[in-house]
Image (cartoon, rainbow, N blue to C red):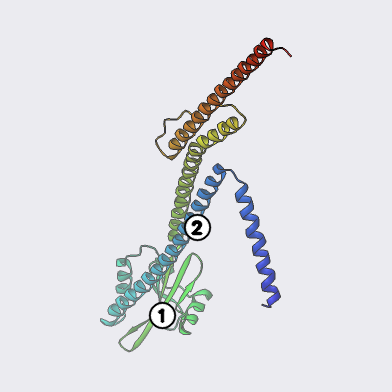
């Protein structure tokens, strides 16, 4: 960035900052309080949602870790079953039925030559040939990509080794749709809760702003009336806070001004009477001593 561009950017920022400052200064006290509370609420909500998304990422990472642990446990279990003796498909099927498949859409064991499914949590697929998709997943696993993310499901391909013999592959399909639905529900609940809290906060902010700015507006109105010469107005308040002290001080000031006005009126009357007396004395003197 050149020096000229930096100067232009600084000038633009100065203009924007000055414009925002001037606009803020033109706002009434009530509007300023509401604007500050609104800005604070938006900042808190922004931080809240950032934390939520970070938490969601952490939960997805934990989900992936649990998927890896489950895959490893299944791999070990299948290896133990197949290492007992000759391969027994019924024994494998019995093991598959005992697995805790919560959140697992399908678990299949694929033969070593990758031509058919020899055991599966879905009995309808046992003995059937592999689809092109499964062959692609096995090919990716052999290239070092055992986990494939397909939006609403994770596909995990794990080799099964009994002793030194490669028995086949485990194809584990974990359904993330329930997890995604759960996260969306939680997010919707949090958005509704945040909106409710935000709405209540804004209503409370407006109420508090009104309760604090209304007495000040009354002070301004009475001050303008006093400035125009009307000293008969006073502020009536039962508040014991700073605004109450301000009202009492203002009433005391108006009372002192009223006393000063009365004193000045008395002085004017006295001066007027003194002037009349002096005038009468002059007339009497002229009568007694005519020219």
* Distance Cα–Cα, label 2 vs label 1: 52 Å
Vertical relation: 85 (above or below) 265:
below
Foreground of the two, 140 or 241: 241
Query: How many neighbours does mark 1 have within 10 angstroms: few (below 14), some (14-19), or many (20 or more)?
Result: many
Where disc 2 sits, the SS reads helix
Q: Which mark is residue 46?
A: 2
**Residue 227 seen in the current view:** yes
Q: Position of residue 147 (x, y in %)?
A: 45, 75
The residue shown at (68%, 71%) is 7
Q: Residue furthest left?
A: 84
**From the viewer's perspective, is residue 276 above or below residue 61?**
above
Q: In the picture provided, is 122 more to the left or to the right than 11? A: left
Label 1: element kind: strand
Residue positioned 48% across, 36% down in the render? 211
Task: Name the front one of labels 2 and 1.
Answer: 2
x 42%, y 63%: residue: 55
| Residues at discs 2 and 1 in contact (Cβ within 8 Å) | no
- Is residue 89 visible to us here? no
Q: Quadrant of the N terminus?
A: bottom right
Mark number, residue 3: none
Residue 116 picture location, percent across and down = 44, 77
* Closer to the camera in the image, 33 or 106: 33
Where residue 101 appears, as percent x and y from the top left, is 35, 65
**Of pointers 2 and 1, the one earlier in the residue sequence:** 2
Residue at the far top: name it. Answer: 287
Q: Which residue is mark 1?
A: 111
x and y percentages locating residue 291 in the rendered image: 74, 14
Task: Count the marks.
Answer: 2
Label 2 CA crowd tier, 10 Å (few <14, some 14–19, many 20+): few
């Amino acid at each position: 960035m050149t020096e000229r561009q930096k100067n232009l950017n600084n000038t633009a920022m100065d203009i924007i900052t000055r414009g925002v400052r001037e606009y803020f200064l033109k706002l009434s006290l009530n509007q300023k309080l509401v604007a500050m509370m609104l800005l604070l609420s938006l900042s808190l909500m922004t931080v809240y949602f950032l934390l939520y998304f970070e938490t969601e990422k952490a939960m997805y990472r934990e989900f992936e870790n649990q998927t890896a642990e489950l895959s490893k446990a299944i791999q070990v279990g299948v290896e133990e079953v197949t290492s007992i003796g000759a391969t027994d498909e019924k024994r494998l099927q019995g093991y598959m039925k005992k697995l805790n498949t919560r959140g697992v859409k399908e678990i299949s064991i694929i033969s070593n030559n990758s031509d058919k499914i020899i055991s599966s949590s879905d009995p309808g697929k046992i003995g059937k040939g592999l689809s092109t998709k499964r062959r692609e997943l096995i090919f990716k696993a052999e290239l070092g990509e055992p986990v494939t993310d397909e939006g609403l499901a994770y596909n995990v391909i794990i080799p099964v080794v009994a002793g030194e013999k490669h028995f086949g592959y485990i194809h584990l399909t974990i359904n993330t749709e329930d997890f995604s639905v759960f996260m969306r529900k939680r997010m919707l609940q949090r958005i509704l809760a945040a909106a409710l809290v935000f709405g209540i906060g804004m209503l409370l902010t407006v109420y508090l702003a009104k309760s604090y700015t209304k007495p000040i507006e009354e002070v301004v109105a009475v001050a303008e009336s006093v400035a125009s010469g009307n000293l008969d107005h006073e502020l009536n308040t039962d508040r014991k806070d700073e605004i109450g002290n301000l009202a009492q001080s203002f009433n005391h000031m108006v009372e002192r001004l009223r006393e000063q006005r009365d004193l000045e009126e008395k002085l004017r009357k006295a001066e007027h009477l003194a002037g009349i007396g002096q005038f009468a004395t002059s007339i009497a003197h002229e009568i007694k001593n005519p020219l």
